[in-house]
Image (spheres, rainbow, N blue to C red):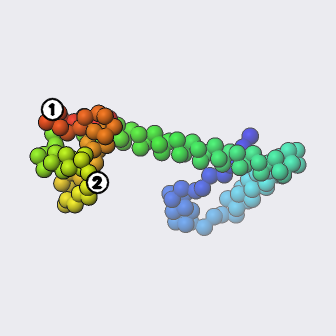
């Protein structure tokens, strides 16, 4: 049984500060819950040893962080899958791509002019996948 505590959400914090002062009955209930949980923690520490409890806590925290990292990677991957580009490069993009293919090139274009597209096509071309030449009637990257 893990002892990993999670951080309160913004809604939890907001509701805590915006609620009416607690009654004596509520305070008594909270005190009882704290005592029960504290006793549970102490009993666990006594039976397992403080070092083992801390080790379990660290392992549970690492597992939680790994699960969060994995979930974030899955969200990013889904975003990438949903952001599939399809289109035909413009002539100036093809000219810049040709130049960048032949030699080291710095491309200075305004926002939305296709710098990222040129970079993707260049990577695709250098990796051996074609990318934006005259024989390409479109680009579909996944």
Q: At 26% from the left edge and 55% from the top edge, which residue is drawn?
A: 105
Relative vertical location of residue 113 with respect to residue 124 in this rendering, above or below: below
Q: In screen coordinates, is 90 left or right of 60?
A: left
Q: At 31% from the left edge and 40% from the top edge, which residue is drawn?
A: 126
Task: Name the residue nearer the viewer: 18 or 48.
Answer: 48
In x, y percent, where is residue 104?
28, 54
Q: In screen coordinates, is 32 left or right of 125?
A: right
Tell which residue pokes out farthest to the front in this image.
102
Marks 1 and 2, how far apart at CA: 24 Å
Residue 13 makes an appearance in the image? yes
Relative vertical location of residue 44 with respect to residue 25 in this rendering, above or below: above
Tell which residue pokes out farthest to the left in this image.
91
Tag 1 residue: 135
In x, y percent, where is residue 102?
24, 47
Q: In screen coordinates, is 47 left or right of 96?
A: right
Task: Name the residue nearer the viewer: 52 or 121.
Answer: 121
Task: Name the residue nearer the viewer: 103 or 97.
Answer: 103
In x, y percent, where is residue 75?
43, 42
Q: In screen coordinates, is 141 left or right of 54?
A: left
> How many numbered callouts?
2
Q: Which quadrant holds residue 76?
A: top left
In x, y percent, where is residue 96?
18, 50
Tag 2 residue: 104
Which quadrant does the N terminus fall into? top right
Instruction: Please rate how many residues cluster around mark 1, counting C-alpha atoms within 10 Å: few if below 14, some from 14 to 19, many from 20.
Output: few
């Amino acid at each position: 049984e893990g002892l990993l505590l999670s951080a309160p959400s913004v809604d939890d914090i907001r509701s805590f500060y915006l609620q009416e002062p607690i009654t004596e009955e509520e305070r008594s209930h909270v005190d009882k819950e704290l005592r029960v949980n504290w006793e549970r923690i102490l009993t666990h520490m006594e039976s397992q040893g403080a070092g083992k409890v801390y080790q379990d806590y660290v392992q549970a925290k690492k597992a939680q962080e790994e699960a969060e990292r994995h979930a974030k990677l899955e969200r990013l991957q889904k975003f990438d899958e949903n952001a599939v580009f399809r289109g035909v490069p413009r002539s100036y993009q093809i000219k810049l791509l040709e130049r960048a293919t032949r030699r080291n090139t710095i491309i200075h274009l305004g926002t939305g002019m296709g710098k990222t597209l040129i970079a993707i096509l260049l990577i695709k071309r250098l990796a051996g996948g074609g990318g934006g030449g005259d024989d390409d009637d479109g680009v579909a990257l996944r």
